[in-house]
Image: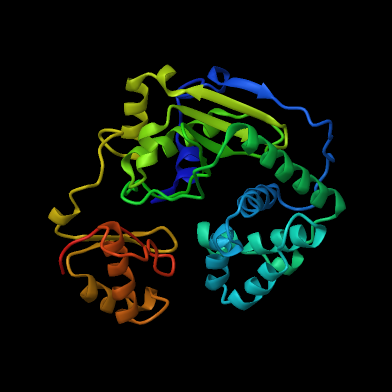
Amino acid sequence: MASVTQRVEKFKQPYGGFLSPNDFTKTVFDDGIELYSEENIYAGLVGIAVDYLIRFMTGTSAEEAFKISLIGSQYMKQENKAKEFIKHIKGLDDQSIIYTCKLVGYDVCARVGTFRYKPVEDINPDENTVSNIRTMVNRSLSFWEHSGPIIKEGFTFELAYTPTITCGDGDYLTEDTLWDLKVSKNSPTSTHTLQLLVYYILGLRSIHLEFQNIKKLGIYNPRLNIAYLLENSKIDSSLIKEVATYVVGVHSPLERVETHMHVKEWVIVSPDGKTYRCSNLKHWLREHEHLLDGTVTQASDGIRKIKYSLQGKRKNKSYHWKGWQLLEWGDN
């Protein structure tokens, strides 16, 4: 019952890690710009702001680029404020970046829980922070011109999650490479490379057929302006199977969840990451109505829409209902 990030951070790897960062080929880019050494907001917010602004600047709508932030604002019942913020995000001008930093302050509510929320009004990036974010986004846009095009971004792994890993979203796919974006001041660690490998395994199991063409794993860090790349052919298949078994919780990285129609029970995950099992969905929802942000009927309809989306029976796909997710389903 954890996200990909939470799982890999807690998992004790063998000495040196499953995937050594030293095995990745390093390419350094130089734009002649030196970033300011200090920033006045949490580094995690800077990373999310850079990531979402890249998506926005490459043509994704603001509503889609900042969708997790908007979901998080709903948990705090501040969706109107979030919508006001998003109206001010138009590009890479100072105001757009400032309101981006405020808006992504809601992300933690959707990803971790509202107990980690801090008032977005208190998120006020200074000139150095704004400048650094702008530079990192521009570096990333140049990088994608060199290494792209991007074919998928901000994707989740429908049909691939397990009772061990119940959520997590990847950053970018190009034609043959799975990319993760990092804005750390330091080089990648074995935790970062394991996270990337887990994304790859989940991708192979997911509904995203593009993963069948992925031949390389990459990390791009616009703060350092360095790309790290590893060919999948250099990763031992036994290592991939070991990570799939002990980290992801499946017997094979290619084991896909294609037999849901034979499952006799529903397996659902709450917004705070707890997994619940039941044989009769509506009966369970009635008994646990206090957990729902809505009526039993609304919850039942929302979760069944997820089921039909995963079965490919809905044109307008839906993979969450107010933060609830569906791993397996029954008939009742």
In the image, residue 106 above or below residue 33: below
**Residue 116 visible in this rendered orientation of the protein:** no
Residue 9 x/y as whole percent? 51, 39
Quadrant (top left/top right/bottom left/bottom right) for the C terminus? bottom left
The residue closer to the viewer here, 102 or 227, is 227
Name which quarter of the figure residue 120 lies in.
Answer: bottom right
Query: What residue lies at 55% left-to-right and 25% top-to-bottom?
Result: 229
Left or right side of 111 for 326:
left
Query: What residue lies at 18% left-to-right and 70% top-to-bottom?
Result: 280
Left or right side of 17 for 37:
right
Left or right side of 226 for 328:
left
**Residue 70 visible in this rendered orientation of the protein:** yes
Residue 252 x/y as whole percent? 27, 33
Q: How is the image coloured?
A: rainbow
Name which quarter of the figure residue 220 lies in.
Answer: top right
Residue 321 x/y as whole percent? 39, 68
Residue 210 x/y as whole percent? 39, 40
